Image (tube, rainbow, N blue to C red):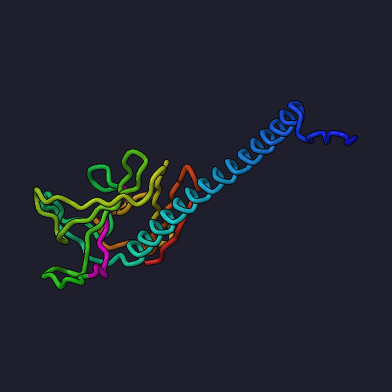
Amino acid sequence: MTLARREKGFTLLEIIIAVGIFAVISALAYGGLNTVLRSAQKTEAAADELQQLQLAMSIIQQDLSQITDRPVRNEFGEREGAVVSPGSFGRLITFTRRGWKNPAERPRSTLQRVAYLLEDGKLIREYWPQLDAAPGVETVKYPLLENVAEVRFRFLDEQKKWRNEWPPLSATKKILSPPRAVEITIVSEQWGSIPRLFPL
């Protein structure tokens, strides 16, 4: 007489416990993966913002370090100094710089009239297609930096005194030449206060 072999398998309770453990482990793994993905997104966003800041500061450095002593005629036909701050129409600063590259070899000057302005939290670089502005000529605007709360300029005069405007309001005669140095301070929501000094 042979004994019948009992079939071995999982009971319903064991299956429910196994599914529950798998669900808990899956939830923990998903939470960890979600945290990693969020961290990667934040890191990528911060890297993009840092790259934008570095590019903006590089352009600002190229502009301000190449300021040259070349007064111009503005859109009203009036003589304007090489550096004017604050400028007309809400511009923070307007100046003449050298070193405007001309890869297409167009018939134009290598000097360029540039301005900076702050619009809706964006620091914008603006330039004119020709050095002396003509009435009705449209400028070219390029946004440099976003989430900017404030931009301040200071200017070092011949007596080594810092001025908040150029030419100084207290000057006895109209100054058309640039200052000895320019300091820019950008207050960003992301990076805080960023000062830079450019001797001329």
Whole-percent x, y for residue 181 in the image: 39, 62
* Residue at x 84%, y 33% (from the top left corner): 4
Is residue 134 left or right of 151 when viewed as pictured?
left
* Residue at x 35%, y 65% (from the top left corner): 62
* Residue at x 28%, y 67% (from the top left corner): 68
Residue 188, compared with residue 103, is above or below; it is above
Q: Is residue 96 magenta?
A: yes
Whole-percent x, y for residue 30 in the image: 61, 39
Asked whether the viewer can see residue 155, the reply is yes
Is residue 55 or residue 160 the one in the foreground?
Answer: 55
Is residue 169 or residue 113 the one in the foreground?
Answer: 113
Is residue 29 or residue 197 the one in the foreground?
Answer: 29
Residue 21, compared with residue 182, is above or below; it is above
- Total numbered labels: 0
Residue 147, quarter of picture: top left
Is residue 160 left or right of 132 when viewed as pictured?
right
Is residue 194 left or right of 134 when viewed as pictured?
right
Which span of residues is magenta-colored?
92-101
Residue occupying the far right of the picture: 1
Which quarter of the image is occupied by the C terminus?
bottom left
Residue 90, compared with residue 112, is above or below; it is above
Residue occupying the far top of the picture: 13
Residue 105, quarter of picture: bottom left
Residue 147, compared with residue 58, is above or below; it is above
Q: Is residue 67 magenta?
A: no
Whole-percent x, y for residue 128 in the image: 18, 56
* Residue at x 60%, y 42% (from the top left corner): 35
Whole-percent x, y for residue 122 in the image: 35, 44
Asked whether the viewer can see residue 192, the reply is no
Which quarter of the image is occupied by the N terminus?
top right
